Image (spheres, rainbow, N blue to C red):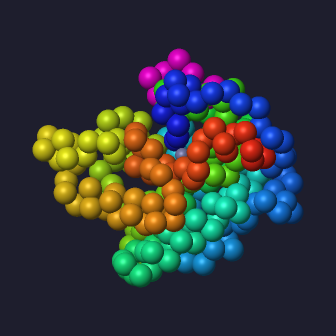
C-alpha cells in the first residue's frame, strides 16, 4: 500500500494545485508508463486482483507517473537490463488519484491495516505520481518470490531488519536477494524503499512533493 504511519512524521500541506485524473493524458507534467520501454505494467487496483478484491480504478486510466518519476524508472530499467537481463520491472501501482486514496482509507479505517495507508488529509505520494509499487518478473513473466505478497500488511513485508527475519525462518536468503535486486535497481533510479513495504518506492522528499507538485484528484 504505502506510507506506513505517515501521519506521525508528515505534515499536512496543501497541494500546489489539483488536476482531475481525467486530464492526465494531456498534462505535460505526467508521463504514460507505456512510454517506458521494457517496463511491465499490471495495475492491481485496476482489477479485482488485490487484497480487497475490488476494482478501484474502474474506467480511470492510472498508468501514469510524474515525468520526473518516469525518468527515474527509466534509470531503474536500464540498471536491470545491464545487471540482471533476465529480469524485468513490473509496476503494480503508480498514479493513485486522491479519490481512490479516500476509498482505500474508508475500506481500511478501524482495522490494524489502516496504519499502512496515508491519511487522505495528508495525501499519498502516489497521488502526485511520485511513488510506485513494483516487483520483478523473470523471463517467463512470473513474479519473483519476495517472501510476502504485494499489499500483505505485516512484518513479513518489512525491509528494515530482513536479517532477523531470515534468522527466524520467516524469509529465505533468496527472498532477500530478490528484494535487494529490486532495491538496487530502484535506488539506482533515485527512489527510496519504504521501511514497511518491500514493493513501495518514493521519489524525492515527501513534504516537498506535497508542497510543490500537482496532486491528482
Ligand atoms: Zn505504494
**Left or right, residue 202 beside residue 82:** right
The residue at the point 48 percent across, 52 percent down is: 192
Q: Residue 89 at x, y = what percent?
A: 48, 68
> Is 30 located above or below residue 102 in the figure?
below
The residue at the point 56 percent across, 25 percent down is: 7
Image quarter where the C terminus lies is: top right
The residue at the point 32 percent across, 60 percent down is: 180
Q: Residue 26 at x, y = what percent?
A: 86, 63
Q: Is residue 107 magenta?
A: yes
- Asked whether residue 21 appears in the rendered view, the answer is yes
Q: Residue 111 at x, y = what percent?
A: 49, 21
Q: Is residue 99 magenta?
A: no
Start-end of magenta stretch: 105-114
Q: Residue 212 at x, y = what percent?
A: 74, 44
- Asked whether residue 64 appears in the rendered view, the answer is no
The residue at the point 81 percent across, 41 percent down is: 16
Q: Quadrant of residue 119?
A: top right
> Is 46 located above or below residue 112 in the figure?
below
Q: What's the magenta bit mostly, secondary-structure-wise?
A: helix
Q: Quadrant of residue 108?
A: top right
Amino acid at each position: 500500500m504505502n506510507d506506513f504511519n505517515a501521519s506521525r512524521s508528515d505534515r499536512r500541506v496543501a497541494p500546489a494545485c489539483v488536476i482531475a485524473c481525467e486530464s492526465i493524458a494531456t498534462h505535460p507534467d505526467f508521463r504514460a508508463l507505456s512510454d517506458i520501454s521494457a517496463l511491465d505494467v499490471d495495475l492491481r487496483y485496476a482489477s479485482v486482483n488485490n487484497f480487497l478484491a475490488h476494482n478501484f480504478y474502474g474506467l480511470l486510466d492510472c498508468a501514469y507517473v510524474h515525468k520526473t518519476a518516469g525518468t527515474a524508472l527509466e534509470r531503474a530499467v536500464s540498471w536491470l537490463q545491464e545487471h540482471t537481463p533476465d529480469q524485468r520491472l513490473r509496476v503494480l501501482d503508480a498514479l493513485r488519484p486522491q479519490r481512490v486514496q479516500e476509498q482505500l482509507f474508508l475500506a481500511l479505517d478501524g482495522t490494524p491495516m489502516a496504519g499502512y495507508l496515508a491519511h487522505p488529509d495528508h495525501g499519498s505520494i502516489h497521488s502526485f505520481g511520485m511513488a510506485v509499487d513494483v516487483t520483478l518478473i523473470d523471463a517467463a513473466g512470473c513474479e519473483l518470490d519476495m517472501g510476502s505478497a504485494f499489499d500483505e500488511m505485516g512484518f513479513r513485508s518489512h525491509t528494515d531488519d530482513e536479517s532477523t527475519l531470515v534468522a527466524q525462518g520467516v524469509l529465505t536468503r533468496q527472498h532477500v536477494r530478490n528484494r535487494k535486486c529490486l532495491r538496487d535497481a530502484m535506488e539506482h533510479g533515485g527512489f527510496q524503499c519504504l521501511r514497511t513495504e518491500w514493493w513501495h518506492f518514493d521519489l524525492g522528499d515527501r513534504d516537498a512533493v506535497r508542497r510543490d507538485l500537482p496532486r491528482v484528484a
